[in-house]
Image (tube, rainbow, N blue to C red):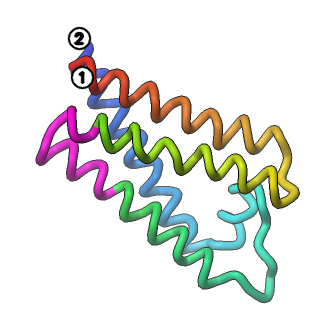
Amino acid sequence: MLTPIAYGFAVLLDLFVLFIGLRFLLVPQAAAAGYGVPAKKDGDTAYLTIKGQRDFVYGILGLALLFFVGARAEAWFMLVVALIPLSDAVIVLRNGGTKAVAFGIHFATAVAVLISAVLLFLV
């Protein structure tokens, strides 16, 4: 019973990261606003593209690890990449974003990723 939940949650999180990456690549200004630190209208496109590409690749990597290597590799991956939303929360707070976005989106995402890691370690 735990295996389908652990795998399903991991796939959901990986697909979510893929979606975020695509959003930054396709509609970077809207994605940046949703991130919690709006981008300047006349700049920042290279950095937004880098963020989109990074997130897209992390989503693919997570799926590849899960399907080709297994739950334990995905668990370690999730444990490590939980640092990304944690650092995103700090970035939002340091750059004038709201606590609601920092904790309600980024910190909550880090907690979800850590829960996923624990579930994957248990299967």
Report the side of 27 relative to 103 (left or right). Answer: left
Kindly state the secondary structure of the residue where label 1 is placed: helix
Under mark 1, the amino acid is: Pro
Any mark on residue 1, and which? 2
Give how far across and how far down residue 12 sits, in percent.
Answer: 39, 39
* Residue at 21% in and 20% down: 123
Q: Which residues are magenta?
A: 60-74
- Relative horizontal placement of residue 98, taking residue 106 as reference (left or right): right
Q: Residue furthest top?
A: 1
Q: Nearer the viewer, residue 11 or 115?
A: 115
Residue 68 part of the magenta-drawn span: yes
Residue 37 shown left or right of residue 51 in the figure? right
Which residue: 38% across, 46% down?
14
- At label 2, which amino acid type do we have? Met
**Exactly how many numbered labels are in the figure?**
2
Above or below, 24 against 103 in this view is below
What number is the disc on residue 4?
1
Where in the figure is residue 32, as x and y percent of width and height?
70, 65
